Image (spheres, rainbow, N blue to C red):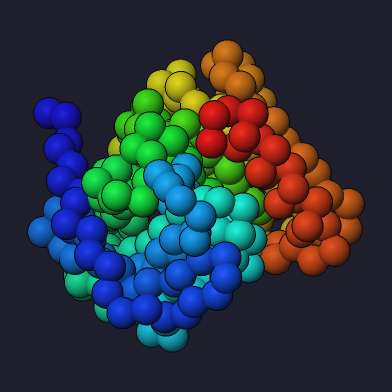
């Protein structure tokens, strides 16, 4: 059965900030039975505008606050004419809680991003045919998931220092060491060697034949959090599937991007414009 998504009911709440280039709002939208919070930057220039959903990396939900994780990207892109919706995901900030999120290996975050795109389409400020995704670290993996789960939903995807497109890599690197969570997951679904079908179906890399959008990957060679080899493997898999994909590598850049960040963002905007955004 094909999953149905109900993203909508996008509500602009209080104004968080305002400058000459854009206004920043607290927002909420619907995702399944949940309400998801986020922030939205709306350019001051006349619309409708192209738009991006920003997918942040892992931050402990206990300390995460509304709109955290991609602040400089939110500002940079809004100043260049994009409506920017940064989704908090379920269990973060003022979003509804989903007690099964960890046991479900956070697949609900992918649902929240798909619904964010659908909600954005209803906004008077947005051109509904010109929406893209930008994700960082864990959010890069979520971006891959959206591209394979809903081909044609967006125009393009950009990822920075992404996790692996193979769920087993990510489980082994971060989740397995958390005994309580990993034991519950393995009791429910089994080890990858004992239940390979489940883990295969959880991994975007195995469904890259479904992708219809161009993908841009940025990765630093000194990234000690997400090995650059993961992005090389993802690029090769996308290319093997006949997809349009580009990988920019940045010598000596670490996970968070420092000196090369302006170059990476200029490349991002050029890529987006090249593909109609």
The residue sitting at 44% across, 35% down in the picture is 130
Most foreground residue, 255 or 132: 132
Q: In the picture shown, does residue 210 fall above or below 129?
A: above
For the N terminus, the quadrant is top left
The residue sitting at 49% across, 26% down in the picture is 213
Asked if residue 57 can be seen in this view, the reply is no
Which residue occupies the extreme front position in the image?
Answer: 46
Q: How many marks?
A: 0
Could you say where residue 202 lies in the image, as x and y percent from the top left?
36, 40
Q: In the picture shown, does residue 4 fall above or below 108?
A: above
Could you say where residue 82 lies in the image, as x and y percent from the top left?
52, 51
Q: In the picture shown, does residue 237 fall above or below 117?
A: above
Most foreground residue, 160 or 155: 155
Could you say where residue 57 lies in the image, as x and y percent from the top left?
52, 63
Q: Is residue 208 left or right of residue 5?
A: right
Q: In the picture shown, does residue 59 fall above or below 83?
A: below
Most foreground residue, 277 or 31: 277
The residue sitting at 15% across, 46% down in the picture is 6
Q: Is residue 276 left or right of residue 130?
A: right
Which residue occupies the extreme right position in the image?
Answer: 251
Which residue occupies the extreme bottom position in the image?
Answer: 63
Which residue occupies the extreme top position in the image?
Answer: 242
Q: Is residue 49 left or right of residue 6?
A: right
Q: Quadrant of residue 242?
A: top right
Asked if residue 211 can be seen in this view, the reply is yes
Q: Quadrant of residue 65?
A: bottom left
Could you say where residue 30 lies in the image, as x and y percent from the top left?
18, 58
The residue sitting at 51% across, 66% down in the picture is 22
Q: Quadrant of residue 214?
A: top right
Q: Is residue 63 left or right of residue 254?
A: left
């Amino acid at each position: 059965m094909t999953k149905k998504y109900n993203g909508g009911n996008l509500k602009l709440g209080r104004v968080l900030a305002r400058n000459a280039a854009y206004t920043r709002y607290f927002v909420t939208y619907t995702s399944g039975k949940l309400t998801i919070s986020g922030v939205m930057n709306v350019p001051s220039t006349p619309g409708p505008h192209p738009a991006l959903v920003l997918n942040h990396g892992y931050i402990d939900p206990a300390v995460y606050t509304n709109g955290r994780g991609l602040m400089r990207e939110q500002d940079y892109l809004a100043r260049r004419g994009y409506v920017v919706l940064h989704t908090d995901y379920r269990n973060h900030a003022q979003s509804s809680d989903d007690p099964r999120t960890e046991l479900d290996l956070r697949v609900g975050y992918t649902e929240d991003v798909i619904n964010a795109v659908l909600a954005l389409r209803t906004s008077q400020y947005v051109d509904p045919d010109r929406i893209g995704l930008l994700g960082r670290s864990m959010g890069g993996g979520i971006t891959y998931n959206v591209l394979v789960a809903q081909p044609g939903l967006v125009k393009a995807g950009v990822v920075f220092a992404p996790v692996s497109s193979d769920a087993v890599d990510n489980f082994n690197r971060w989740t397995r060491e958390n005994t309580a969570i990993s034991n519950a997951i393995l009791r429910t679904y089994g080890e990858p060697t004992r239940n390979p079908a489940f883990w295969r179906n959880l991994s975007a890399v195995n469904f890259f034949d479904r992708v219809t959008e161009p993908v841009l990957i940025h990765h630093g060679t000194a990234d000690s959090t997400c090995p650059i080899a993961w992005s090389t493997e993802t690029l090769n898999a996308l290319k093997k599937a006949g997809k349009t994909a580009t990988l920019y590598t940045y010598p000596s850049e670490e996970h968070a991007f420092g000196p090369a960040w302006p170059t990476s963002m200029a490349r991002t905007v050029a890529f987006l414009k090249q593909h109609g955004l």
